[in-house]
Amino acid sequence: MPRAPLCTAFLLPMLGALAGCAKPPETVYFVAVGARDEVPKARGACRVAEARPSAPIHFDPAGQTYEAVDPGRVRLPCAQGVVVLDVRRPSRVHVDTTQAAKRGDLLVMELQAFDDAGQRLSFGRAPIAWSFTGALGPRRPPPCTGAEAACAPENAGYAVAFDEGEGQVLARFGGLSSRVVVTVLP
């Protein structure tokens, strides 16, 4: 009796069974300790009660938002796979803005966080303290019309270039800060 057909008859069903055991697709989010945001929906509705381990993250009672409190990886089973919140301690921050503006310009700035390895981390909607001096002054964010893509981040820095000269921007998140100078031209 030939062995090849017999081996094939046993191996093919086993390989098919192994394919069914494939790991569900994952989407990884790198977040800063202190970040606050909505639970990602990239993989459909997530079951936060089944998050493992849950220690680095605090979820609101409804399971809609989270706060990252300690470094670690949290796996959230979701409808179409797994969301991983990879919580890391930021080691540095940087204000992302233009270095030159014209008098009267309205500026929107973003604070970016990075870990020791240079991986960019998300703050989500965590509060960031902004201050402006010199030729820059604070301004209110533009009203959000409800079209989410048109809405600027809640924690962005909003300034107006009201005078010629240099303006300083200082942004703080936790114990980290970043300072940048913007030259305001006529």
Image (spheres, rainbow, N blue to C red):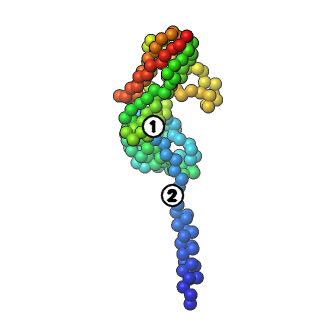
The circle drawn on residue 121 is: 1
**Residue 182 x %, y %:** 48, 18
Query: Neighbour class for label 1 at 10 Å: few (<14), some, many (≥20)?
Result: many
| Residue at x 58% of width, y 82% of height | 5
Q: Please name the amino acid that badge 1 sits on.
A: Leu
Q: Is residue 160 left or right of residue 131?
A: right
Q: Please name the amino acid that badge 2 sits on.
A: Lys
Residue of label 2: 23
**Of all residues shown, which one is farthest toward the left?**
175
Tell me the quadrant of the picture where the N terminus can be found.
Answer: bottom right
**Residue 46 x %, y %:** 53, 46
**Disc 2, SS:** loop
**Residue 57 seen in render:** no
Whether residue 101 is situated above or below residue 4 in the rendered picture: above
Tell me the quadrant of the picture where the C terminus can be found.
Answer: top right
| Residue at x 57% of width, y 79% of height | 9
Whether residue 135 is situated above or below residue 55 in the rendered picture: above
Measured Cα–Cα span from mark 1 to mark 2? 25 Å
**Residue 118 x %, y %:** 42, 39
